[in-house]
Each structure stands twice: as structure tokens, then as C-alpha cells.
Image (tube, rainbow, N blue to C red):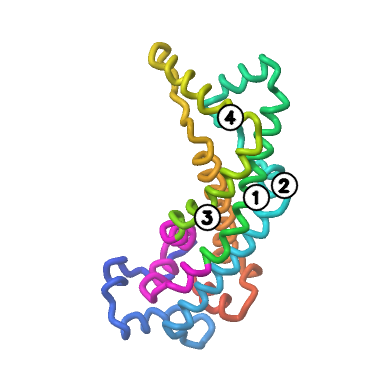
């Protein structure tokens, strides 16, 4: 993707309102109608809200994580040896149920993301907007990550905890992980994070942002994804 502006970021962040207006005018040259700073920021907010809401819609439905190979949360990879041991001692049905529950927890948690995203988007400044506009293909997604991750963790984790507590395997995890980690002192193997809830929470957030990045890329690169006049004007300049 070509950069919309060629100015260094430091210039952007220290630019006066008049200079930012000049940049906005450059964005609007292809349409013949100069864009104001407010137009550009409004267009970015519109794009972010559209992408974030669609991502949540995809992730939060039944099987949104479970049947999506890109989002599906597996048994922790570093615990594959433990998984095999549990299967060997006749707990395969519990392992399967646990994997399903991790994904169901992520789907339920994702529903909480929209207001968090919207609050962050509302707080976007002119400088934020232009930095995103002239940034890389994931600039908007990275903006949302930076602004929302702590709040998403706070909202997601209680939902994940509730879901995982309902699965019998959860009660086995911490002591098994602790025992396994002791063996790694002698075997040199990789220790396991005993905090399953943190693992599922992070995977849920990672999956959601993967979808947000997909939506951002569509709007930046595909004219058909710019479904409003404002999006076409803001993202139409190359």
C-alpha cells in the first residue's frame, strides 16, 4: 500500500492545525473536495467502529472461535505432553470438553468488546487520526490494542474464569502443571503457565484483534469495503 503522506511522524505529531489542514487537503485531492481535519478523524472513527463491530459479530457467535481454524484456542501447546498423558489415563472426553469450553469462553467474552472499542475510538485525537492514516496496514488495529487491551483483559477474564470453572479438568490443571514444571528442572523441558484463565483470555483477545486487522486491511485496500462516502474520500487517496 502506498503511503498517503510522506512527512516524518515527528512532523505530524508537532504540526500546527494549519499544517494538519494542509495534510487533510492532500487526502481530498483525488475527489476534488478538500477534507477538513474533522472529516479525516470522523472517517477513521467510522472505519474503526465498522471494523470492530463486525469483528465482534464474527467472533462472538456460537462456534466463532471453535470452528474458525485461525481463532480456535487449542490445549496450551507447551502442555501437549500433559494432554497426551491425560488422554492415556482415560480423560480424553474431559480434554475435549475443556478445549470446547475454552473456545466457548472466548466467544462469550468477545461480546463485551464493543463498548470498550467505542470508548477508545471516541477518544481519538487529530494527531492519532493522521498517524493512523499514514501508518502501516495495521496502524488502526495497533491503536486499538494499545488503548483497550488492559480493559479487555479486565472484562474478559471473569467470563473466562466462570466458564473454565465449570469444567472438571480445570481442577486438575494447576496441580498437574505444578508437578510437570518441577520435572522440567531435571529434563530441561519448557515450563507450563499454570494460569489457564490468563491463557484463554489472551487467546480471546488475540483472536479478536486478528479479525480487526482483517477489517482494517479490507478498508485500506478494497474500495468495495468503503461503504460510505466519507470512507471513500478518506481512504481513496493513494
Q: What residue do we see at 31% from left, 72% from top?
A: 12
**Left or right of 175, for residue 9:** left
Query: Residue 155, labelled with which disc?
Result: 3
Residue 124 sits in which quadrant? bottom left
Q: CA distance from mark 2 to mark 1?
A: 8 Å
**Mark 4–mark 2 contact, CB under 8 Å?**
no
Report which residue position mark 4 lands on.
171
Q: CA distance from mark 2 to mark 3?
A: 20 Å
Nearer to us of marks 4 and 3 is 4
Q: Main secondary structure of the magenta part?
A: helix
Q: Secondary structure at mark 4?
A: helix
Residue 169 sits in which quadrant? top right
Q: What residue do we see at 63% from left, 19% from top?
A: 86
Query: Residue 63, labelled with which disc?
Result: 2
User: In the rendered structure, which disc, 4 or 2, sits on the residue that comes first in sequence?
Assistant: 2
Please tell me whether residue 127 belongs to the stretch shown in magenta: yes
Q: Could you tell me residue 204's position as x and y percent?
A: 57, 47
Around disc 3, counting alpha carbons within 10 Å, would you say few (fewer than 14), some (14 to 19), or many (20 or more)?
Answer: some
Q: What residue do we see at 43% from left, 72% from top?
A: 123
The front one of 161 and 68 is: 161
Report which residue position mark 1 lands on.
107
Q: CA distance from mark 1 to mark 4?
A: 22 Å
What's drawn in magenta, residue-wise? Answer: 118-147
Q: Could you tell me residue 28's position as x and y percent?
A: 48, 82
Amino acid at each position: 500500500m502506498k503511503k498517503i503522506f510522506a512527512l516524518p511522524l515527528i512532523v505530524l505529531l508537532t504540526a500546527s492545525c494549519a499544517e494538519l489542514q494542509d495534510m487533510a487537503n492532500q487526502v481530498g485531492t483525488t475527489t476534488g473536495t478538500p477534507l477538513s481535519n474533522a472529516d479525516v478523524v470522523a472517517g477513521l472513527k467510522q472505519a474503526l467502529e465498522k471494523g470492530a463491530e463486525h469483528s465482534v459479530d464474527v467472533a462472538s457467535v456460537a462456534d466463532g472461535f471453535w470452528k474458525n481454524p485461525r481463532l480456535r484456542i487449542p490445549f496450551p501447546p507447551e502442555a501437549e505432553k500433559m494432554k497426551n498423558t491425560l488422554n492415556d489415563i482415560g480423560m480424553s472426553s474431559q480434554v475435549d470438553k475443556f478445549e470446547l469450553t475454552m473456545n466457548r469462553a472466548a466467544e462469550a467474552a468477545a461480546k463485551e468488546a464493543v463498548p470498550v472499542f467505542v470508548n477508545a475510538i471516541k477518544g481519538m485525537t487529530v494527531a492519532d487520526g493522521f498517524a493512523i492514516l499514514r501508518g502501516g496496514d495495521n496502524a488502526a488495529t495497533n491503536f486499538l490494542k494499545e488503548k483497550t487491551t488492559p480493559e479487555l483483559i479486565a472484562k474478559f477474564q471473569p467470563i473466562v474464569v466462570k466458564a473454565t470453572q465449570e469444567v472438571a479438568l480445570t481442577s486438575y490443571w494447576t496441580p498437574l502443571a505444578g508437578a510437570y514444571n518441577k520435572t522440567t528442572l531435571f529434563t530441561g523441558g519448557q515450563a507450563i503457565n499454570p494460569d489457564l484463565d490468563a491463557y484463554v483470555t489472551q487467546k480471546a483477545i488475540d483472536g479478536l484483534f486478528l479479525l480487526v486487522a482483517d477489517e482494517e486491511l479490507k478498508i485500506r485496500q478494497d474500495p468495495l469495503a468503503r461503504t460510505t462516502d466519507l470512507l471513500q474520500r478518506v481512504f481513496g487517496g493513494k
